[in-house]
């Protein structure tokens, strides 16, 4: 072989080896990255050409794929978009959120549990289909939660979450303002990009699921945690006499804190039940200071603070009870202020644990995973996370909470013929904005079917009319009635 031919042969061999190395690199090293790149139109076309599974509430598909008249074959649609968007999330060419993301392997048909279905489709030359996801949500409870938030004055920001105390099933999860995931599922990708940019730039943050993604001071609803820690200490019960009065001086400080209404809670010494009924700040400041940071932190963590528990829906923020607070901060934490923050889900878990004899159940939104033929592939089993309080403490707290609804600050949650347990909360924010309104409850008190937490972050309500009972009580009542009467 002469030299020119040899040079050409070597050069071709080098090119062939380079091509082989590059192909190997693309197929085995960067395959995952390239398949997830939204600019990869082959993957995009394949994804949109497969019938994605449905997301179900009861017998109704709140998200499903329908035939389209373009090259992508299937269009993702949402039947009640604003009401369910915080849970379903969206399915867009650039990403997914909510259940669309957490259950994507099932919905897309790529889950290993659908191997037999894929094999049958291949052998029969049928079109591949995704599996279906059955949610735990109760349609009537979700309606009540959403309608309650929509009825708030102005462009309100708020959230409602309802749990089944004995299992942790999420019965309602509503957040406002919301958005329409249909605009993000469009095949007009230019319009989708514009809509995404508009939603991300919206100062009202409609893409946030406030039930799990917003943490704010829980205010007086946190007094349930303080009361639980006090009773668990063995030194108190519902009838114990505790400090009342007009004001409380923070330890190691000249600052004094008064009660919300400026009153004296009924006297210098009152029962624990009365303290909760009138939401006496002096009482719970005093108790938190007496118990100390360690005992308060342990009780908060037993209910789920400083951790996350929701595993089948991304975006849960940690509810925080810092362990490094000084004495004045610890006292303030007793009324849900200082550095204490909570999501509505966390406060619903506190109420649900009290309703469930002290057991904290892991919350979940996915009830069942089903094949395209609706056969059940998997079902979520209830799981106990912790024993937050004893059943005796739970009974004492329930008695106190029932009294608070019967003749205390939580009377807006009263349901005729049903014993309701509840607690209001009004948390102070910065000096230039109105307070946050909270409400937690469960019913029936003697056989709890539902626990609810309501947060009204903002609304066009006069600052002197903002209160957890006035704003959150009617919403919680409607949700509880929807579950009880189903």
Image (cartoon, grey):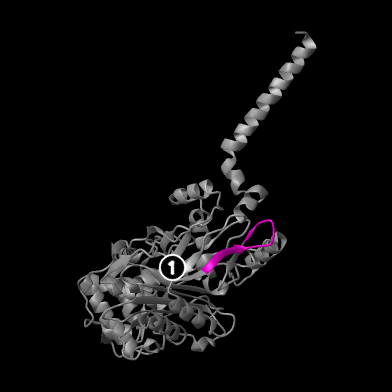
Q: Is residue 70 magenta?
A: yes
Name which residue lies at 38% across and 68% down: 169
Where residue 346 sits: x, y (%)? 40, 68
| Front-most of residues 322 and 69 | 69
Where residue 70 sits: x, y (%)? 69, 59
Circle 1 packing at 10 Å, graded few (<14), some (14-19), many (20+), is some
Disc 1 on helix, strand or loop? Answer: loop
196, above or below 262, in the image: above
Where residue 258 sits: x, y (%)? 39, 83
Q: Is residue 386 magenta?
A: no
Figure quadrant of the C terminus: bottom left
380, above or below 444, in the image: above
Q: Which residue is mark 1?
A: 339
266, above or below 453, in the image: below
| Front-most of residues 421 and 400 | 421
Question: Is residue 215 visible to the viewer in this orientation of the structure?
Answer: no
Question: Is residue 26 visible to the viewer in this orientation of the structure?
Answer: yes
Residue lying farthest to the top in this orientation:
1
Q: Over which residues does the magenta segment extend?
A: 62-74
Tally the numbered discs. Answer: 1
Name which residue lies at 38% across and 86% down: 413
Where residue 416 sits: x, y (%)? 34, 91
Name which residue lies at 33% across and 75% down: 224
346, above or below 27, in the image: below
Tell me the quarter of the picture where residue 137 sits: bottom left
Tell me the quarter of the picture where residue 245 sits: bottom left
């Amino acid at each position: 072989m002469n030299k020119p031919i040899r040079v050409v042969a070597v050069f071709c061999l080098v090119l062939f080896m380079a091509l082989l190395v590059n192909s190997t690199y693309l197929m085995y090293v960067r395959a995952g990255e390239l398949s997830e790149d939204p600019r990869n139109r082959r993957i995009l076309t394949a994804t949109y050409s497969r019938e994605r599974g449905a997301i179900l509430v009861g017998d109704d598909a709140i998200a499903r794929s329908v035939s389209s008249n373009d090259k992508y074959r299937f269009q993702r649609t949402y039947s009640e978009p604003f009401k369910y968007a915080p849970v379903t999330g969206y399915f867009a060419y650039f990403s997914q959120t909510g259940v669309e993301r957490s259950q994507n392997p099932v919905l897309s048909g790529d889950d290993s549990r659908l191997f037999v279905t894929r094999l049958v489709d291949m052998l029969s030359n049928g079109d591949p289909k995704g599996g279906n996801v059955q949610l735990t949500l109760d349609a009537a409870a979700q309606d009540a939660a959403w309608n309650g938030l929509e009825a708030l004055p102005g462009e309100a920001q708020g959230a409602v979450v309802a749990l089944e105390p004995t299992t942790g099933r999420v019965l309602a999860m509503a957040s406002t303002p919301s958005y329409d995931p249909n605009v993000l599922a469009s095949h007009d990708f230019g319009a989708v990009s514009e809509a995404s940019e508009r939603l991300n730039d919206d100062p009202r943050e409609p893409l946030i699921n406030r039930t799990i993604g917003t943490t704010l001071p829980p205010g007086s609803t946190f007094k349930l945690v303080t009361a639980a820690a006090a009773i668990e200490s063995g030194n108190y019960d519902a009838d114990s006499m505790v400090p009342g009065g007009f004001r409380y001086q923070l330890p190691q400080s000249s600052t004094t804190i008064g009660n919300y209404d400026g009153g004296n809670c009924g006297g210098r010494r009152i029962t624990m039940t009365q303290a909760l009924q009138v939401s006496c700040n002096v009482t719970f400041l005093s108790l938190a200071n007496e118990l100390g940071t360690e005992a308060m932190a342990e009780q908060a963590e037993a209910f789920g603070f400083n951790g996350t528990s929701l595993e089948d829906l991304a975006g849960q923020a940690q509810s925080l009870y810092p362990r490094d607070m000084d004495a004045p901060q610890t006292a303030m934490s007793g009324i849900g202020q200082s550095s204490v923050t909570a999501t509505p889900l966390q406060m619903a878990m506190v109420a649900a644990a009290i309703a469930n004899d002290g057991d904290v159940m892991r919350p979940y939104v996915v009830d069942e995973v089903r094949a395209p033929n609706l056969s059940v592939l998997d079902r979520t089993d209830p799981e106990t996370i912790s024993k937050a309080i004893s059943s005796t403490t739970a009974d004492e707290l329930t008695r106190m909470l029932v009294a608070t609804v019967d003749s205390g600050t939580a009377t807006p949650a009263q349901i005729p013929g049903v014993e309701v347990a509840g607690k209001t909360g009004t948390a102070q924010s910065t000096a230039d904005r109105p307070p946050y309104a909270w409400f937690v409850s469960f019913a029936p008190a003697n056989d709890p079917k539902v626990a609810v937490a309501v947060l009204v972050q903002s609304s066009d309500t006069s600052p002197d009319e903002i209160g957890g009972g006035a704003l959150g009580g009617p919403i919680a009542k409607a949700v509880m009635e929807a579950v009880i009467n189903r």
